[in-house]
Image: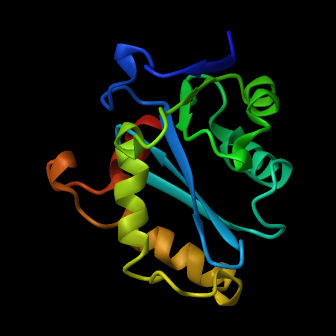
Amino acid sequence: MSGTRPMPFPKEADGRRFGDWEMDLIVDKDGNAILTMIERSTNFLIMEKLKHGKKAMPPAKTVWRLLMPYKGEHLKTITTDNGSEFAEHEWMARKLGPDIYFTDAYSSWQKGAVENTNKLIRQYIPKGTDISTVTDKRIKMIQAKINRRPREKLNFSTPKQEFYKYYA
């Protein structure tokens, strides 16, 4: 069953089960945005610049396009904040199938994997950068670098290696 739910999400979505995702936006002062999504158990990152800003339907369609290959057993839940940019959550739930959970207000720690990854992205795209000047090629390069970075959480394996153990 797909739908939207307030927190807390199910205990099995604790970061150990494959298929639980978190998503967020990195936004500049002009409203240009990069969508970031993390598979929680592997820390695998998918990111893309939003061509039409952060209004509700463009992010929803981008989420659908990027996560569609993982629909089913590889896409169990999505956790995000309750921002207006994710107002089309019911559409996403219908199209993709997972339950979508919303963090409590001022509780970004409830989607800590994507928040921590956004900090890694900020090493490449510092706060204050005009996101409209960041090329799609650079976005993909940053995504690849972060997915190849060994993580202590993964016993010093990489998110890419761990993700493709499940999704092969």
Q: Who's the residue at 64% across and 78% down the image?
A: 29
Instruction: Quarter of the image for the N terminus: give it.
Output: top right
Furthest residue in direction top, as rendered: 1
In the displayed structure image, the side of residue 83 where residue 78 appears, left or right: left
Q: Who's the residue at 48% across and 56% down the image?
A: 45
Q: Nearer the viewer, residue 111 or 69?
A: 111
Identify the colour scheme used: rainbow
Q: Nearer the viewer, residue 72 or 60?
A: 60
Q: Position of residue 25 (x, y in %)?
A: 59, 58
Q: Position of residue 106 (x, y in %)?
A: 44, 43
Name above or below for residue 34 compared with residue 134. Answer: above
In the displayed structure image, the side of residue 104 where residue 26 appears, left or right: right
Q: Position of residue 69 (x, y in %)?
A: 68, 40
Q: Who's the residue at 37% across and 80% down the image?
A: 123
Furthest residue in direction front, as rendered: 106
In the displayed structure image, the side of residue 16 where residue 67 appears, left or right: right
In the displayed structure image, the side of residue 136 where residue 124 appears, left or right: left
Q: Position of residue 78 (x, y in %)?
A: 56, 33
Name above or below for residue 138 compared with residue 160. Answer: below
Q: Is residue 168 visible?
A: no
Name above or below for residue 109 compared with residue 91. Answer: below
Q: Who's the residue at 67% across and 85% down the image?
A: 135
Q: Is residue 105 visible?
A: yes
